[in-house]
Image (cartoon, rainbow, N blue to C red):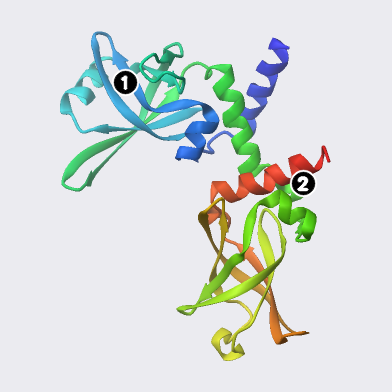
Amino acid sequence: MLSSKKNIIKNYEVEYKGKEIKISTEIYNFLNIFSTVKMVIDNYSMFGIIYSISMNYIRIIFKEKNETLLILAKNKNLCSIRLAENSYPKNNKTYFHFLPVELLDIYAYSYQDKKYNLLTLKFLSSLPEEIAIKVGKLFELKFGQNHRIHERIVVDNQSIKQLKIDFDKSFIKFNGSKHKCLIKDLSYGGALVISFFDYEDAKNDEIDLIFSFEFMNKEILIEGKSRSLNLIQTVNGKAFAIGIAFNENKIPFEYTLLIHDYFTQKQYI
């Protein structure tokens, strides 16, 4: 089993080399780690905030301190970082072992009159297994669903119960106007909706738009384009069936996880 996990991690490291996930509250919770990380160089230490993580490197935000960069330079840009497990109680943190890292890049920036450094640190050893496996799974969610990219969730009574989306609060917004829509199906990369609006508002079949709905009392917003625009007759009059292709780089993690969870649950129903 141990060997199997190591092989899985090695495969993740090769397959998703150079890919990264920007950290959010949902991802912290999924990885079960705190946002703060400790960097140590001999007797010197300081704390930073994780910005993004990959199988091969991590980006951490630190308050700008010239002494930090000087100490790093003297130590041949080598240091160690330590991640903390998001455990309870909060005053009794469990730490993972120190990870040796090497400084690859520094990006300096200002925010609200304060200066920060974004450090890119390359892992010189593998992440702890429990973190590495989960990071790999995140990449599978984000980049590896090609086998299901065209599989669609048809919205019916059963899928409505499973998805827990408030379908009464779904909209498309374009050209400054917001229109209520009826969701007919969903996939990792797009949606099919029906909406009533003046065709002149659309002007052409390819519209830049924002698709939104409410999930667990939170509004999910996804940028995309209409890929098809067809006039149809409904019991309430003429409407448009709109095929939406999401902007791949703007798909919220919550949405990807929502679709992934649906397909996962479906396997056991």
**Residue 239, relative to residue 39: is it above or below?**
below
Residue drawn at x 64%, y 80% as measured from the top left: 205
90 with respect to 206 (left or right): left
Q: What residue type is labelled 1?
A: Asn
Coordinates of residue 232 in the picture (x, y in percent): 76, 84
Q: Which amino acid does label 2 sit on?
A: His
178 with respect to 95 (left or right): right
**Residue 43, relative to residue 49: is it above or below?**
above
Name the residue carrying label 2: 147
Front-most of residues 130 and 161: 161
113 with respect to 257 (left or right): left
User: Residue 231: which disc?
Assistant: none
Coordinates of residue 241 in the picture (x, y in percent): 71, 77
**Residue 8, relative to residue 138: is it above or below?**
above
Coordinates of residue 160 in the picture (x, y in percent): 72, 56
Q: State the quadrant of the C terminus.
A: top right
Q: What element carries label 2?
A: helix
Q: State the quadrant of the N terminus.
A: top right
Front-most of residues 60 and 28: 28
18 with respect to 185 (left or right): left
Residue drawn at x 54%, y 87% as measured from the top left: 201
Question: Quick one: label 2, few (<14), some, or many (20+) residues within 10 Å?
Answer: few
Q: Quadrant of residue 52?
A: top left
Q: Is mark 1 on a helix, strand or loop?
A: loop
**Residue 188, relative to residue 204: is it above or below?**
above
Front-most of residues 246 and 182: 182
User: Residue 77: which disc?
Assistant: 1
- Residue 51 seen in the current view: yes
Q: In which quarter of the image is residue 67?
A: top left
**Which numbered disc, 1 or 2, marks the residue that appears first in the sequence?**
1
